Image (cartoon, rainbow, N blue to C red):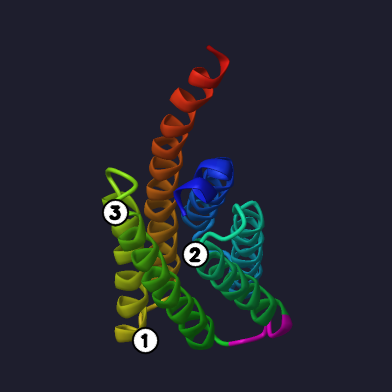
Amino acid sequence: MIETLKRGWWLLVLRGLCAVLFGILAFAWPGMTLVTLVLLFGAYALVNGIFTLGLAFRAPKGTGATGTLVLLGLLGIAAGIVTFAYPGATAITLLWIIAFWAIFSGVLEIAAAIRLRKELTNEWMLILAGLLSVLFGVLAIARPGAGALSIIWLIGAYAILFGIMMLALAFRIRALVAPAGRTKLA
């Protein structure tokens, strides 16, 4: 799995940047309509899923990471498509879609980190990102009656923190690639 991440570290950067941008937009436009939020989330989930599938397809043949990455990518794409297919969904329905997507994604991220613990130091960043996803999903389910503004801020905070964790992981993995690249040139 570490080879897959080394080859596609920049896709993690894109995932992180998309998450941070999504979070900033959620804070910048807290009064946006529910339909705008639905479309913004749908676009984020779809792009995140596509980038994750891209990472899976860049995986070396025979690595065990491909299945998890494909599942995570398809889950993101499915969440985006469902969101676009039903843009008139209520805030509660959107919240449930986001919450379950976050929980399932978080569990898969934690599982990936556990697989990486012998190959990568500081795998805690991916574990923390996964725990953050699960915590967000559980909180969203536990408080479905919260006001639209608090939901937007919760989603925005989650997206920014998750994006920062993805960026930190990406640059940690990039640091592993750089010494290997210099060795080959010498």
Quarter location, residue 108: bottom left
Q: Does 173 sit left or right of 93 as displayed?
A: left
Distance Cα–Cα, label 3 vs label 1: 39 Å
Find disc 3 in the rendering and name its residue. 117
Q: Position of residue 118 (x, y in %)?
A: 29, 51
Find disc 1 in the rendering and name its residue. 145
Q: Does 145 sit left or right of 78 as displayed?
A: left
Q: Identity of the amino acid at label 2?
A: Gly
Find disc 2 in the rendering and name its residue. 64
Q: Earlier in the sequence, mark 3 or mark 2?
A: 2
Q: Residue at x 51, y 42 (%)?
A: 6
Quarter location, residue 61: bottom right
**Would you say the magenta stretch is mainly helix, strand or loop?**
loop
Q: For residue 108: magenta?
A: no
| Magenta residue span | 85-89
Is 8 rendered above or below residue 48? above
